[in-house]
Image (cartoon, grey):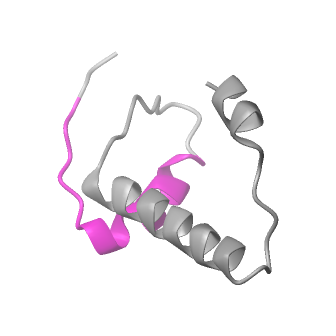
Amino acid sequence: MTQITLAVQEKKLLFFMELIKNFDFIRIEDVDSKAAIKANIKQGVKELNLIKQGKLKAKPIKQLLDEF
């Protein structure tokens, strides 16, 4: 198997990843891009704000730590 490295615009990364997942001859290795990190942080902040507003129930800290 040949390995290549691609540079993809952050705003197009999620689309690109969905596209290449459909090819069975492509193996995707760890993708730790800025876009993925930003998306995870954004989701976390959104959930935290919902918890503060009482619209989402927080997990007990023990349950959260047990996930790791």
10 w.r.t. 4: above or below: below
Q: Nearer the viewer, residue 19 or 54?
A: 54
Q: Number of numbered discs present?
A: 0
Left of 19 or right of it: where is 35?
left
Answer whether residue 44 is magenta in the image. no
User: Residue visible at 75% across and 58% down?
Assistant: 58
Image quarter for residue 8?
Answer: bottom left
Relative to 20, residue 40 above or below: below
Considering the image in quadrants, where does the C terminus appear?
top right
Give the residue at the far bottom of this rendering. Answer: 53
Q: Nearer the viewer, residue 8 or 3?
A: 8
Residue drawn at x 68%, y 78% as measured from the top left: 50
Residue 17 position, x and y percent, is 46, 54
Residue 47: quadrant of the picture:
bottom right
Is residue 10 found inside the magenta-colored segment of the image?
yes
Nearest the eye: 28 or 44: 44
Considering the image in quadrants, where does the N terminus appear?
top left
Q: For the point 70% across and 71% down, which residue is it?
A: 51
Q: Which residues are magenta?
A: 4-22
Q: Is residue 26 above or below residue 2?
A: below
Dividing the picture into quarters, in which one does residue 18 lie? bottom right
